Amino acid sequence: MPLYQYSARDEQGKKIDGMMPAQNKAELAHTLKNQGMLLVFAMAKKEKSEQKWQGIAIWKRVSLTEKMMFIKHMAVMVKAGMPIPRILDILALQTNSRYFKEVLNSIKEEIKSGKSLADSMEKYPKVFPPLFSSAIRIGEIGGNLEEVLELLSVQLQKEHEIRSKIKGAMIYPSVIVVAMVIIAILLMILVVPNLIKVFSDMEIELPLSTRIIIGTSNFMTNHIILTLGITIAIPIAFLMFKSTVFGKNFLHFVYLRIPVVGGIVKKVNTARFARTLSSLLKSGVAIVNALDIIANSLDNIYFKQALKFAGEHVQKGSPLHEAIDKYPNLFPPIVTQMIKVGEETGSSEQIMAQLADFYEKEVDEITKNLSSIIEPALIMVIGGAVGFFAISVIQPMYTVMDYMG
């Protein structure tokens, strides 16, 4: 039986932290309720052997495409009436990922030993996030697993479309930036040293911009290995910084405030929030649990914090739109108003699906026009760099001509 680390509130609203064994979060919440406490947060503590195994396999990942195809095929097979172990056996043979094959075979053995599909999936949160296990548990209990799998399939399809559009839009500027860096390094190492010889023969005082280029070129030419090392180390250092808590908070703060980029981040996270909430509510997941699941599935730390707060707010009996309304920098008024309408009319599932459709179309339009937005900025940067280089080279020539005149 897994051991859960939890946070709860008693009848006076006092926060209580502790640890308790339970089969799942639902059982933990029920036990705490009998003790006069309301569950706010719970996380299963993994056994040491499992932690060690997952630590060794931390580099192993299953792509969103693999998971999307898995859920889609599983929904079809469940509809056809096939037993779950047989389905997992077939899907394990179809996947190209060795790690995913191992996970599916392990889940199959768990089910054969008497465990549910949701409990078996819960052991692999890196592969099957809480969205999967929570929705599938509701489907198993309610006898509508086929419908839940179809909803998850739609959810993953929409998420895959958004990610693909954003990645596609970023390919062009990424290629241009990499090409600029390579060309700049080649110019400094191969071209500028020849110009230095010419300027040395002139015996004139060089402008500051020319001296900067010459100094940079001398350093790069004399320390080629160090230059290459720095060029490789910069993106690696950025990725390491990005993986730290401070780095994530800082970058997510910056992303939200960069023109155009901030708008995309807000629309993508709002679309995922609305789509996931709609899917979970349709699956029968309680709204407090749904908000906790969504908070753990979103990328931006500020959206995570907002939804964590919203979950606690709703758990105390307040409507969701009031909690969302406290974050106007993340959720525009249209989101708050549509959530309010859904709560008042009892149609939150449909309203959130419509909201997701709206923001997914917004993201689609932005990504289509993203290249036309980025292109002028890239032209200005490239033009500025070329202009600086040209002036630095040509200006000494004019100085010599004036001297000779």
Image (cartoon, rainbow, N blue to C red):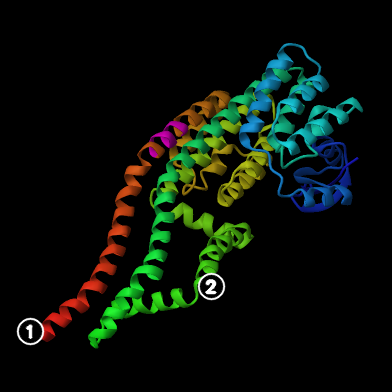
Amino acid type, residue under disc 1 in the picture = Gly
Secondary structure beneath dot 2 equals helix
Identify the image quadrant of the N terminus. top right
In the picture, measured across the screen, residue 34 lies left or right of residue 11, that is right
- Is residue 365 magenta-colored? yes
At horizontal 41% and vertical 70% (from top left) the residue drawn is 189
Badge 2: residue crowd in 10 Å (few <14, some 14–19, many ≥20): few
Main SS, magenta region, reads helix
- Is residue 85 magenta-colored? no
**Quadrant position of residue 31:** top right
Identify the image quadrant of the C terminus. bottom left
Residue 226 - label = 2
Amino acid type, residue under disc 2 in the picture = Leu
Q: Compared to 327, does 338 lie above or below?
A: above
Magenta span of residues: 360-366
Residue 389 location, x and y as percent?
29, 68
Residue 272 location, x and y as percent?
55, 36
In the picture, measured across the screen, residue 291 lies left or right of residue 47, that is left
Residue 405 - label = 1
Badge 1: residue crowd in 10 Å (few <14, some 14–19, many ≥20): few
Q: Are marks 1 and 2 in contact (CB under 8 Å)?
A: no
**Mark-to-mark CA distance, 1 and 2:** 43 Å
Q: Compared to 384, does 143 lie above or below?
A: above
**Quadrant position of residue 147:** top right
Secondary structure beneath dot 1 equals loop
The first of marks 1 and 2 along the sequence is: 2
Camera-nearest residue between 280 and 102: 102
Residue 265 - label = none
